[in-house]
Image (tube, rainbow, N blue to C red):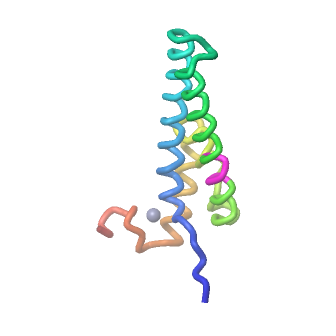
Amino acid sequence: MTATRRLPACVHVEIGANLQTSRDYLVHLAVDLANTYGKASREARAADKALRAVDELRHTLDDASAGELPGNAWSAAIYYGANAEVRQPDIARVLQVHQADSPNCLCIEGNN
Ligand SMILES: [Zn+2]
């Protein structure tokens, strides 16, 4: 028997927020390095590469979460706009559906 591998919604939400923070940081870093060393410098190109890697990871996990969390349990806000104020109602809904479906999850206060 093959186990279905999946992450709980609360973990996707946490990863999404961290990738958003990482991306925001790398955007600023790439600009700073390009201004300091030049756009074509090794330093600036390495920062651009790191940014593209974060974007690829985010896109891949966005796809994975969409496959793992059906209907109302998923939102594009998990991986895109995770830290934006305007997307917080979507994140809250995802976590509410998750906690109703998984009452034993460690993300619920009192379960750990
Ligand atoms: Zn959970």
Q: Is residue 54 above or below residue 9?
A: above
Q: Which residues are magenta?
A: 58-62
Who is closer to the viewer here, 46 or 68? 46
Q: Residue furthest bottom?
A: 1
Judge left or right: residue 106 versus residue 42: left
Q: Quadrant of the C terminus?
A: bottom left
Residue found 65% across the figure and 60% down from its top: 64
User: In terms of image quadrants, where is residue 71?
Assistant: bottom right
* Image location (x, y in percent) of residue 65: 63, 59
Residue 69, position as x, y percentages in the image:
64, 64
Judge from the rendering whether residue 26 lies leftward or rightward of residue 48; answer left or right: left
Between 94 and 10, the one lying in front of the other is: 10
**Quarter of the displayed picture in which ligand 1 can be seen:** bottom left
- At horizontal 61% and vertical 84% (from top left) the residue drawn is 2
In the image, taking residue 44 as reference, residue 71 lies left or right, namely: right
Q: Quadrant of residue 109?
A: bottom left
Residue 19 in the image, given as x and y percentages of width and height:
52, 42
Whether 62 is drawn above or below 44: the answer is below
In magenta stretch: residue 61: yes
Identify the residue at image location x=32%, y=69%. Answer: 111
